[in-house]
Amino acid sequence: MKRKITMVQYGCGKMSKYTMRYALEKGVKLIGAFDIDENKIGKDAGLIHGDKKYNVKVQNASELDAFLQNNEVDVVIVTTTSLISELEDVLITCAKNGVCAITTCEEAFYPQNSNPKVFKKIDKLAQETGATICGSGYQDVFWGNLISVLAGATHKITKIIGKSSYNVEDYGIALAKVHGAGLTKKKFQEEIASLDDISVEERKKLINKGEFAPSYMWNVNGWLCSKLGLHVTKQTQECVPQIAKNDLNSETLGMVIPKGRCAGMSAVVTTETKEGITIQSECIGKVYDKDEFDCNDWTIQGEPNTQVIINRPCTVELTCASVINRIPEVLCAPAGYFTTELMPENNYKATALDKYIEFVGDCGCCGHDCDCGDDCNCHDGHRCSEDCDCN
């Protein structure tokens, strides 16, 4: 690529501290930052969670559309909420303007199996404008590609079992609330657990209407099945409260969670496949007690059995690094909502990210020595049509 990649940060919460710094340190040019929080708007994006100025003022989220129309933006990094229905407007805005977007939204990792309505809407528009939209983060590597690589060293698989835990304090208030942190057992049953006490047919109707609330592993299991070439015959999920054994101080919620209330929840997703392989994955998200820590534990049962245990992963930093390292693959991917199991594995980028872009040039066409002429349909400089001589 003949110029720096340009990036916009959407959502200036805890995750943005790392996504912005990591992007800048990998040679990306930060040209915009947006948030809905009035206390952040007008402040320098670098000073919200750090002590270094980025010379980029945080703007109101409502101004994103006009900004994308009037500036040359390659990618928008979205670090806000966990459900794709809550991100529909911002992802549509990116797609409408032909701008690529990567989000840490957990459902966005593989939304076609939980909200096909929104997925198809974004996919259609992005294909029309030449944008690529996807979800990435911790699950891209630690719940996805790590497992598929281990599967590649296995002769026969009968079952895949995964268990991962994380402290909701590290991710902000939206995620903490989705996990039921601070609720009574009764409220948890009414507001969260009861949503899964339904038949398979009822769940299908909710999914088709875009009203299903998936746990994170729901989308991970779908991603894994797609990556491994498995065909889903049945999938269920159960949400179980994680009860606080002691009073827990939650800075994110601004409260002390009393002993006996919900510190968060465990969500177990079981997927059965036509190939006879079962995937059972569990994610535990809660406000941690003083002796608890993040872990990631996966077992592949078959011939041979393989287990990998990662204790105390830096989940937040790994999430953000995964997203930033994905930028080159996203800019070179086909247009549409293109999930990451269809992309190359998320490899380490040792130098500036623009060095990993093969099909971008300042001319709005491509960086290769070719004669695109009037037949080239490149959009915003990140992919060439079939008529281009470089294909």
Image: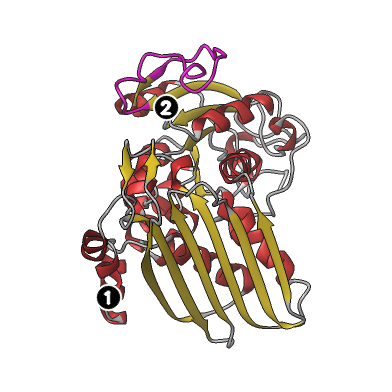
Circle 1: is it few (<14), some (14-19), or many (20+) Cα within 10 Å?
A: some
Q: Report the side of 155 relative to 385 (left or right).
A: right
Which residue: 63% across, 33% down? 365
According to the picture, the residue beneath numbered tag 2 turns out to be 68
Residue 183 placed where, x, y %? Answer: 27, 54
Q: Report the side of 297 relative to 43 (left or right).
A: right
Q: Is residue 223 above or below residue 23?
A: below
Q: Which residues are magenta?
A: 35-58
Mark 1 vs mark 2: in front = 1
Q: Quadrant of residue 230?
A: bottom right
Circle 2: is it few (<14), some (14-19), or many (20+) Cα within 10 Å?
A: many
Name the main secondary structure of what is drawn in magenta: loop
Q: Report the side of 299 relative to 207 (left or right).
A: right
Mark 1 or mark 2, which has the lower sequence index?
2
327 or 138: nearer the viewer? 138
Amino acid carrying label 2: it is: Leu
Number of marks in the rendered image: 2
Camera sees residue 383? no
Question: Are circles 1 and 2 on residues that touch, CB within 8 Å?
Answer: no
Quadrant including the N terminus: top right
Give how far apart the Cα atoms at labels 1 and 2 are.
43 Å
- Is 319 one of the magenta-colored residues? no
* SS of the residue under disc 2: helix
243 or 383: nearer the viewer? 243
Q: Is residue 183 above or below residue 329?
A: below
Residue 72 placed where, x, y %? Answer: 51, 24
Residue 108 placed where, x, y %? Answer: 45, 53
According to the picture, the residue beneath numbered tag 1 turns out to be 197
187 or 65: nearer the viewer? 187
Amino acid carrying label 1: it is: Asp
